[in-house]
Image (cartoon, rainbow, N blue to C red):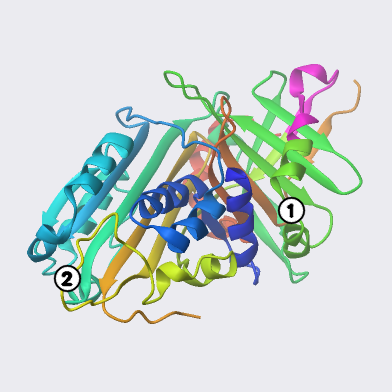
């Protein structure tokens, strides 16, 4: 159920052909902290989306993995937040409890940037934070900066045709590798091509990147995609070491930022009371005599990814803003060649527990015309196939 949330959100955010990346794990953490703040039907709706799978615990590893939670509270509102809820956040989520004057977004944006290894900047606007209705923010951040177990040589990077979803063609900056080991696996049938590349393990965490490129339209394929299909495809992956010939892979580079307010998506999935003036926040907030309602106004989700020869840098933040007042709801053997030369979806997951950190689509890679000069020296110095 936990991984299905990511694919369901990806489906809702992929109505048009564009680069998308979401972090199901970040969303789950933010929603779980929100669920603990609610009661009654409000809580039940959120819990039904989260399912029964417990949240995995992750620590921080300097310059490799970052993971953090926080509860930002407007300092003039702090006496209304129940100590029992704050204790729950600290004990269950290792969350930082931070009092702030909410004068602008400088402090919270700085915290997010620091916790995402500098990858995500300027998450919130000054107006969003300083609004007098904005009383508290639940925040999850996570980030990785991991090397491939078998990195690509820059001298092999070249321009190669990439076929866009509209039928046009571009020349994409494409990484090339001839591989024989078990750090790369593949699967092909008459419907799709799948490719897995393992990242260098750190401590007890081992991640892999899995690309799935359907032979048909990616947007149509995603509409029926589920964790069951993902598990079926990954169970069929064959390591390069099992292939008798060379396995040659050509993978486009890409780098982009993505942001979305997930309110409409979550409403589509069945969560609506928490965005209304009938939301029940009794586990978190001491009621006031004026009976003013509380609700979630925004669920801001931002991600960043750099996918290149040496590895993957990726980060995400999810911010749940809690407001007072009526809430506005928004709408030789021959070599086998694996070419990721059409739009594809991808997943970055923990190999030990299967938890998906990132899921996305890649419709438009880096353009070779913008990158060629960077690789010219490496190209001339290396052996190009």
Q: How many marks?
A: 2
Tag 2, which secondary structure? loop
Which residue is nearer to you in this view: 278 or 15?
A: 278
Marking on residue 182: none
Q: Is residue 14 left or right of residue 342?
A: left
Work out whether 272 lies above or below 3: below
Whole-percent x and y of residue 342?
74, 55
Tag 1, which secondary structure? loop
Instruction: Give the magenta part as a residue range.
Output: 234-248
Tell me the residue at 55%/41% (across/down). Answer: 52
Quadrant of res 328: bottom left
Residue density around tag 2, few if under 14, some if 14–19, many if 20 or more, within 10 Å: few
Which is nearer the N-term, disc 1 or disc 2? 1
Marks 1 and 2 sit apart, C-alpha to C-alpha, by 46 Å
Task: Determine contact: label 1, label 2, CB under 8 Å.
Answer: no
Quadrant of res 215: bottom right
Name the residue that disc number 1 marks.
225
Work out whether 232 lies above or below 303: above
Is residue 102 visible to the viewer in this orientation of the structure? Answer: yes
Q: Is residue 65 left or right of residue 91?
A: right
Whole-percent x and y of residue 163?
74, 61
Tell me the residue at 72%/50% (across/down). Answer: 226
Name the residue that disc number 2 marks.
288
Q: Is residue 277 left or right of residue 312?
A: left
Quadrant of res 3: top right
Work out whether 375 lies above or below 237: below
Residue 107 inside the magenta-drawn segment? no
Which residue is nearer to you in this view: 122 or 343?
A: 122
Query: Which mark is nearer the camera, 1 or 2?
Result: 2
Classify the position of the C terminus by image quarter. Answer: top right
């Amino acid at each position: 159920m936990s991984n299905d949330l990511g694919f369901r959100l990806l489906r809702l955010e992929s109505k048009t052909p564009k680069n998308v990346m979401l972090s199901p794990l970040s969303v789950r953490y933010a929603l779980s902290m929100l669920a603990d703040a609610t009661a009654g039907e409000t809580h039940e709706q959120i819990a039904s989306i989260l399912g029964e799978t417990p949240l995995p615990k992750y620590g921080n590893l300097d310059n490799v993995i970052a993971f953090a939670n926080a509860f930002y509270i407007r300092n003039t509102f702090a006496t209304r937040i129940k100590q029992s809820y704050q204790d729950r956040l600290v004990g269950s989520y290792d969350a930082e409890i931070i009092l702030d004057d909410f004068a602008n977004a400088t402090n919270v944006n700085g915290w997010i940037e620091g916790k995402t290894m500098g990858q995500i900047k300027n998450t919130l606007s000054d107006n969003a934070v300083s609004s007098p209705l904005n009383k508290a923010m639940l925040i999850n951040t996570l980030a990785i900066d991991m090397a491939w177990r078998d990195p690509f040589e820059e001298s092999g990077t070249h321009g190669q045709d990439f076929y866009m979803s509209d039928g046009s063609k571009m020349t994409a900056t494409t990484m090339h590798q001839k591989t024989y080991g078990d750090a790369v696996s593949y699967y092909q049938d008459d419907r799709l091509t799948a490719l897995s590349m393992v990242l260098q393990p750190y401590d007890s965490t081992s991640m892999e990147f899995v690309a799935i490129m359907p032979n048909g339209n990616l947007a149509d394929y995603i509409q029926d995609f589920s964790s069951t299909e993902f598990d079926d495809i990954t169970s069929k992956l064959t390591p390069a070491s099992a292939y008798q010939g060379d396995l040659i892979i050509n993978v486009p580079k890409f780098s982009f930022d993505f942001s979305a307010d997930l309110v409409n998506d979550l409403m589509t999935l069945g969560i609506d009371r928490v965005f209304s003036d009938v939301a029940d926040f009794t586990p978190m907030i001491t009621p006031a005599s004026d009976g003013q309602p509380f609700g979630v106004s925004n669920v801001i989700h931002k991600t960043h990814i750099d996918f290149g020869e040496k590895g993957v840098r990726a980060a995400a933040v999810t911010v749940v803003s809690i407001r007072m007042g009526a809430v506005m709801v928004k709408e030789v053997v021959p070599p086998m060649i694996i070419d990721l030369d059409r739009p594809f979806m991808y997943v970055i997951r923990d190999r030990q527990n299967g938890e998906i950190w990132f899921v996305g689509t890649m419709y438009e890679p880096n353009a070779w015309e913008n990158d060629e000069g960077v690789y010219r020296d490496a190209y001339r110095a290396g052996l190009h196939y």
